[in-house]
Amino acid sequence: MRFVRNLIGLLGFLLIWEAVVRVGWVDQNDLPPPTVVFARIGQLLGDVEFVRDVVASALAWVIAMAISVVIAVPAGLVLGSVRWLREATKAVVEFLRPIPSVALIPLVLIVIGGGPEAKISLAVYASVWPILFNTIYALAEIDPLLVETARSYGTPRSRILTSVALPHAAPFVFTGIRMAAAISLIVVISTEFLAGAKLGIGQFVLEASSGANRMDLVLAGTVVAGVLGFIVNEGLERLGRRLFRWSTDEGTAA
Protein backbone atom coordinates (compact mmCIF):
# COMPACT_ATOMS: atom_id res chain seq x y z
CA MET A 1 0.00 0.00 0.00
CA ARG A 2 2.83 2.36 0.85
CA PHE A 3 4.51 1.58 -2.49
CA VAL A 4 1.26 2.32 -4.35
CA ARG A 5 0.87 5.70 -2.60
CA ASN A 6 4.46 6.63 -3.39
CA LEU A 7 3.99 5.59 -7.01
CA ILE A 8 0.80 7.65 -7.34
CA GLY A 9 2.56 10.70 -5.90
CA LEU A 10 5.51 10.28 -8.26
CA LEU A 11 3.29 9.82 -11.32
CA GLY A 12 1.27 12.88 -10.34
CA PHE A 13 4.44 14.97 -10.08
CA LEU A 14 5.69 13.76 -13.48
CA LEU A 15 2.32 14.48 -15.14
CA ILE A 16 2.28 18.03 -13.76
CA TRP A 17 5.87 18.55 -14.92
CA GLU A 18 5.03 17.24 -18.41
CA ALA A 19 1.92 19.40 -18.66
CA VAL A 20 3.67 22.59 -17.53
CA VAL A 21 6.29 22.18 -20.23
CA ARG A 22 3.96 21.02 -22.99
CA VAL A 23 1.55 23.96 -22.60
CA GLY A 24 4.49 26.33 -23.01
CA TRP A 25 4.69 27.79 -19.51
CA VAL A 26 8.38 26.83 -19.49
CA ASP A 27 10.76 26.67 -22.44
CA GLN A 28 11.68 23.06 -23.26
CA ASN A 29 15.29 24.10 -23.72
CA ASP A 30 15.36 25.29 -20.10
CA LEU A 31 13.30 22.46 -18.63
CA PRO A 32 12.85 19.39 -20.84
CA PRO A 33 9.72 17.31 -20.08
CA PRO A 34 10.12 14.01 -18.23
CA THR A 35 9.42 11.99 -21.39
CA VAL A 36 12.53 13.52 -22.96
CA VAL A 37 14.59 13.16 -19.77
CA PHE A 38 13.73 9.49 -19.26
CA ALA A 39 14.35 8.73 -22.92
CA ARG A 40 17.79 10.28 -22.50
CA ILE A 41 18.40 8.20 -19.37
CA GLY A 42 17.62 5.05 -21.37
CA GLN A 43 20.24 6.07 -23.93
CA LEU A 44 22.80 6.94 -21.27
CA LEU A 45 22.46 3.59 -19.51
CA GLY A 46 23.76 2.03 -22.71
CA ASP A 47 26.73 4.42 -22.76
CA VAL A 48 29.86 2.88 -21.22
CA GLU A 49 31.27 6.28 -20.25
CA PHE A 50 28.15 7.28 -18.32
CA VAL A 51 27.93 3.90 -16.57
CA ARG A 52 31.56 4.39 -15.56
CA ASP A 53 30.65 7.76 -14.06
CA VAL A 54 27.83 6.19 -12.05
CA VAL A 55 30.10 3.39 -10.83
CA ALA A 56 32.78 5.92 -9.84
CA SER A 57 30.33 7.89 -7.70
CA ALA A 58 28.83 4.76 -6.14
CA LEU A 59 32.25 3.30 -5.35
CA ALA A 60 33.44 6.54 -3.74
CA TRP A 61 30.25 6.56 -1.65
CA VAL A 62 30.76 2.96 -0.49
CA ILE A 63 34.38 3.62 0.51
CA ALA A 64 33.46 6.84 2.33
CA MET A 65 30.67 5.14 4.27
CA ALA A 66 32.88 2.23 5.28
CA ILE A 67 35.57 4.58 6.58
CA SER A 68 32.98 6.72 8.37
CA VAL A 69 31.53 3.74 10.22
CA VAL A 70 34.98 2.48 11.22
CA ILE A 71 35.86 5.91 12.62
CA ALA A 72 32.58 7.10 14.11
CA VAL A 73 31.24 4.02 15.88
CA PRO A 74 34.31 3.31 18.07
CA ALA A 75 34.79 7.04 18.69
CA GLY A 76 31.13 7.39 19.68
CA LEU A 77 31.35 4.44 22.05
CA VAL A 78 34.43 5.88 23.74
CA LEU A 79 33.13 9.45 23.97
CA GLY A 80 29.72 8.27 25.08
CA SER A 81 31.10 6.16 27.91
CA VAL A 82 34.02 8.33 29.11
CA ARG A 83 32.51 11.57 30.34
CA TRP A 84 35.74 13.50 30.96
CA LEU A 85 36.96 12.72 27.45
CA ARG A 86 33.62 13.82 25.97
CA GLU A 87 33.81 17.10 27.86
CA ALA A 88 37.46 17.63 26.86
CA THR A 89 36.72 17.20 23.16
CA LYS A 90 33.35 18.97 23.09
CA ALA A 91 34.71 22.36 22.04
CA VAL A 92 36.74 20.90 19.17
CA VAL A 93 33.84 18.75 17.96
CA GLU A 94 31.35 21.62 18.10
CA PHE A 95 33.80 23.80 16.18
CA LEU A 96 34.39 21.28 13.40
CA ARG A 97 30.87 19.90 13.01
CA PRO A 98 29.16 23.01 11.51
CA ILE A 99 31.84 23.55 8.85
CA PRO A 100 30.31 22.63 5.45
CA SER A 101 32.28 19.97 3.63
CA VAL A 102 32.20 21.90 0.35
CA ALA A 103 33.90 24.83 2.10
CA LEU A 104 36.91 22.57 2.62
CA ILE A 105 37.28 21.72 -1.08
CA PRO A 106 40.14 24.23 -1.72
CA LEU A 107 42.06 22.97 1.32
CA VAL A 108 41.55 19.32 0.37
CA LEU A 109 42.62 19.96 -3.22
CA ILE A 110 45.86 21.53 -1.98
CA VAL A 111 46.62 18.90 0.66
CA ILE A 112 45.33 15.72 -1.03
CA GLY A 113 44.89 16.62 -4.68
CA GLY A 114 41.96 16.35 -7.06
CA GLY A 115 41.69 12.58 -7.38
CA PRO A 116 39.08 10.26 -5.89
CA GLU A 117 40.71 10.79 -2.49
CA ALA A 118 39.34 14.34 -2.36
CA LYS A 119 35.65 13.42 -2.67
CA ILE A 120 36.08 10.41 -0.39
CA SER A 121 37.79 12.51 2.30
CA LEU A 122 35.11 15.20 2.20
CA ALA A 123 32.32 12.61 2.26
CA VAL A 124 33.93 10.95 5.29
CA TYR A 125 34.17 14.31 7.05
CA ALA A 126 30.48 14.99 6.45
CA SER A 127 29.28 11.47 7.27
CA VAL A 128 31.12 10.94 10.54
CA TRP A 129 29.02 13.40 12.54
CA PRO A 130 25.54 11.79 12.30
CA ILE A 131 26.94 8.38 13.21
CA LEU A 132 29.11 9.78 16.01
CA PHE A 133 26.36 11.80 17.67
CA ASN A 134 23.75 9.07 17.35
CA THR A 135 26.15 6.68 19.04
CA ILE A 136 26.87 9.14 21.86
CA TYR A 137 23.15 9.84 22.25
CA ALA A 138 22.38 6.12 22.45
CA LEU A 139 24.89 5.59 25.25
CA ALA A 140 23.43 8.53 27.17
CA GLU A 141 20.00 6.82 27.01
CA ILE A 142 21.16 3.40 28.18
CA ASP A 143 19.65 2.12 31.43
CA PRO A 144 22.31 2.59 34.16
CA LEU A 145 21.07 -0.58 35.82
CA LEU A 146 22.33 -2.63 32.89
CA VAL A 147 25.81 -1.18 33.20
CA GLU A 148 25.88 -1.52 36.99
CA THR A 149 24.75 -5.13 36.79
CA ALA A 150 27.53 -5.93 34.34
CA ARG A 151 30.08 -4.20 36.57
CA SER A 152 28.87 -6.08 39.64
CA TYR A 153 29.79 -9.31 37.88
CA GLY A 154 33.29 -8.00 37.26
CA THR A 155 32.82 -7.38 33.54
CA PRO A 156 35.66 -5.21 32.19
CA ARG A 157 34.83 -1.85 30.57
CA SER A 158 35.76 -3.05 27.09
CA ARG A 159 33.39 -6.01 27.42
CA ILE A 160 30.61 -3.76 28.70
CA LEU A 161 30.99 -1.59 25.61
CA THR A 162 30.75 -4.53 23.20
CA SER A 163 28.22 -6.75 24.99
CA VAL A 164 25.96 -4.21 26.73
CA ALA A 165 26.35 -0.74 25.25
CA LEU A 166 26.75 -1.62 21.58
CA PRO A 167 23.64 -3.86 21.31
CA HIS A 168 21.58 -1.10 22.98
CA ALA A 169 23.08 1.56 20.70
CA ALA A 170 22.82 -0.47 17.48
CA PRO A 171 19.41 0.85 16.30
CA PHE A 172 20.50 4.44 16.99
CA VAL A 173 23.83 3.86 15.23
CA PHE A 174 22.04 2.40 12.23
CA THR A 175 19.81 5.46 12.01
CA GLY A 176 22.96 7.59 12.02
CA ILE A 177 24.31 5.47 9.18
CA ARG A 178 21.12 6.03 7.18
CA MET A 179 21.40 9.77 7.68
CA ALA A 180 25.10 9.72 6.81
CA ALA A 181 24.46 7.67 3.65
CA ALA A 182 22.36 10.44 2.09
CA ILE A 183 24.81 13.14 3.20
CA SER A 184 27.77 11.19 1.86
CA LEU A 185 26.22 10.73 -1.58
CA ILE A 186 25.37 14.42 -1.79
CA VAL A 187 28.92 15.41 -0.87
CA VAL A 188 30.50 12.95 -3.32
CA ILE A 189 28.48 14.26 -6.27
CA SER A 190 28.82 17.90 -5.17
CA THR A 191 32.59 17.55 -4.94
CA GLU A 192 32.73 15.97 -8.39
CA PHE A 193 30.76 18.95 -9.71
CA LEU A 194 32.61 21.72 -7.88
CA ALA A 195 36.12 20.30 -7.99
CA GLY A 196 35.99 18.98 -11.54
CA ALA A 197 36.65 15.29 -10.96
CA LYS A 198 37.76 13.04 -13.82
CA LEU A 199 34.88 10.62 -13.28
CA GLY A 200 31.50 10.71 -11.56
CA ILE A 201 27.91 11.84 -11.94
CA GLY A 202 28.84 15.34 -10.78
CA GLN A 203 31.50 15.57 -13.48
CA PHE A 204 28.98 14.40 -16.09
CA VAL A 205 26.48 17.08 -15.02
CA LEU A 206 29.23 19.73 -15.05
CA GLU A 207 30.24 18.90 -18.61
CA ALA A 208 26.63 18.79 -19.81
CA SER A 209 25.82 22.18 -18.30
CA SER A 210 28.99 24.04 -19.23
CA GLY A 211 29.45 22.73 -22.75
CA ALA A 212 26.44 22.73 -25.04
CA ASN A 213 24.06 23.59 -22.20
CA ARG A 214 22.26 20.26 -22.60
CA MET A 215 19.61 20.49 -19.91
CA ASP A 216 18.23 17.10 -20.94
CA LEU A 217 21.58 15.54 -20.01
CA VAL A 218 21.83 17.64 -16.85
CA LEU A 219 18.42 16.48 -15.67
CA ALA A 220 19.12 12.90 -16.73
CA GLY A 221 22.25 12.83 -14.59
CA THR A 222 20.39 14.48 -11.72
CA VAL A 223 17.55 11.96 -11.87
CA VAL A 224 20.02 9.06 -11.89
CA ALA A 225 21.68 10.52 -8.78
CA GLY A 226 18.26 10.85 -7.14
CA VAL A 227 17.33 7.26 -7.99
CA LEU A 228 20.66 6.08 -6.59
CA GLY A 229 19.98 7.95 -3.37
CA PHE A 230 16.44 6.54 -3.16
CA ILE A 231 17.71 2.98 -3.64
CA VAL A 232 20.34 3.46 -0.93
CA ASN A 233 17.86 4.90 1.57
CA GLU A 234 15.15 2.34 0.81
CA GLY A 235 17.61 -0.51 1.05
CA LEU A 236 18.97 0.67 4.39
CA GLU A 237 15.47 1.26 5.73
CA ARG A 238 14.40 -2.28 4.84
CA LEU A 239 17.61 -3.68 6.29
CA GLY A 240 17.05 -1.74 9.51
CA ARG A 241 13.52 -3.09 9.90
CA ARG A 242 14.80 -6.62 9.43
CA LEU A 243 17.78 -6.28 11.77
CA PHE A 244 15.99 -4.42 14.56
CA ARG A 245 12.53 -5.95 14.71
CA TRP A 246 12.95 -6.12 18.48
CA SER A 247 13.31 -2.34 18.63
CA THR A 248 10.17 -0.20 18.52
CA ASP A 249 12.22 2.79 17.40
CA GLU A 250 15.62 2.90 15.74
CA GLY A 251 16.22 6.20 17.54
CA THR A 252 17.49 9.50 16.31
CA ALA A 253 19.67 12.08 17.92
CA ALA A 254 18.36 15.59 18.26
Image: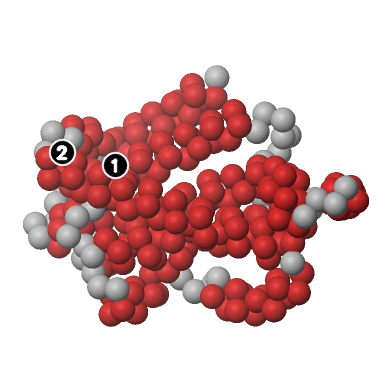
* Quarter of the picture holding the C terminus: bottom right
For label 1, the SS is helix
Residue 234, above or below 82 = above
Between residues 207 and 9, which one lies in front from this camera angle? 207
The amino acid sitting under disc 2 is Leu
* Dot 2 crowding, Cα within 10 Å, few <14, some 14–19, many 20+: some
For label 2, the SS is helix
Q: Which mark is residue 174?
A: none
Q: Quadrant of residue 93?
A: bottom right
Residue 148, above or below 229 = below
Q: Position of residue 225 (x, y in %)?
A: 32, 45
Q: Circle 1 is placed at which residue position?
A: 224
Q: Please report the residue visible at 59 percent of the width from the left and 28 percent of the height from the top.
A: 242
Q: Please report the residue visible at 77 percent of the width from the left and 69 percent of the height from the top.
A: 83
* Quarter of the picture holding the N terminus: top right
Residue 32, above or below 63 = above
The amino acid sitting under disc 1 is Val
Q: Position of residue 252 (x, y in %)?
A: 66, 50
Q: Position of residue 240 (x, y in %)?
A: 58, 35
Task: Say whether marks 2 and 1 touch (CB < 8 Å).
Answer: yes
Q: Quadrant of residue 123?
A: bottom left
